[in-house]
Image: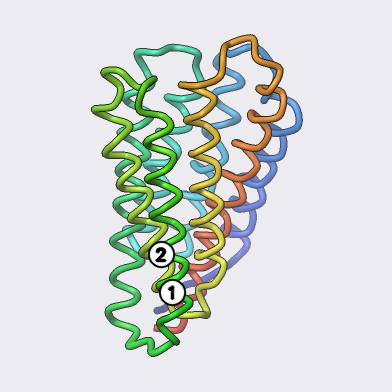
Amino acid sequence: MGMEFGPAFWGLAALGTAAAIAYGTYFLNRPHGWLRASVKTLFMAAFAGALQVAGAPAPLILAVIASAFGDFFLAFDKKWLLPFGILSFLIAQLLYVLIFGAVWFFSGDNAPLLPRYIAMALVIATAIGFLIWMAPKLGWMALGVVPYALAITLMGVAAMWLPWPGWPAMIGALSFLVSDFVLAAELFRLPPDSPARRVTAPVVWWTYAAAQILIIWGVLRLAQTM
């Protein structure tokens, strides 16, 4: 696939990376507000621009845009925005599933199956265990959380079927699962004043940022080989 990684791509990618670092090192523990939300949103928005100028596959661009909207909605301490954030990331996860499935289908990859089956089983077992643990606290939010949990689990499973050159996306998918599981625990299980939040918040952000960058990297690597 013909993609061009010129100065505009690298400039926007650097801007997105800088926004992720700035948010994680400074804004993460600052009061909620428009500046904080803007920096958080800039992370994925800049990468969406980078992918657009590079001529990346449209589903990947759309997934990154959906993630930027999710970051924006979740940047505010407003419970009524939470469903919009979940919906945005649900769209992103389904697009990642579409991408991973299409890559596997058209690649003709014949890698050994046993490691894939083991990885899939671990992803599914972890997701089921986590949902059981979360269930008593979800309430009406289960209507959004459960479909999202199914989608991100499917994304993690689909990533395990990528051809081996897409290994960054495999690691990124697992990192995304870690980030969202910790975020769910933070939202629904931890008290607002829990000391554990000093640890969970950085874990959520850095595993999420790493996940997105690794998935983008892995998909671009695969797109260049097809």
Image coords of residue 128 (percent x, y): 37, 45
Report helix, strand or loop for mark 2: helix
Drawn side of residue 214 relative to residue 87, left or right: right
> Which residue is located at x 59 percent, y 66 percent?
6
Q: Which mark is residue 120?
A: 2
Within-10-Å neighbours for mark 1: few <14, some 14–19, many 20+:
some
Report which residue position mark 1 lands on.
Answer: 116
Kind of residue sitting beneath label 2: Met
Kind of residue sitting beneath label 1: Arg
Q: Which mark is residue 44?
A: none
Marks 2/1: CA–CA distance? 6 Å
> Which residue is located at x 32 percent, y 24 percent?
83
Instruction: Please report contact status of discs 2 and 1: CB closer than 8 Å, yes or no.
Output: yes
Image coords of residue 181 (percent x, y): 49, 38
Residue at the outermost right position? 25
Q: Which color mode does the image show?
A: rainbow
Foreground of the two, 200 or 94 = 200
Image coords of residue 104 (percent x, y): 33, 77
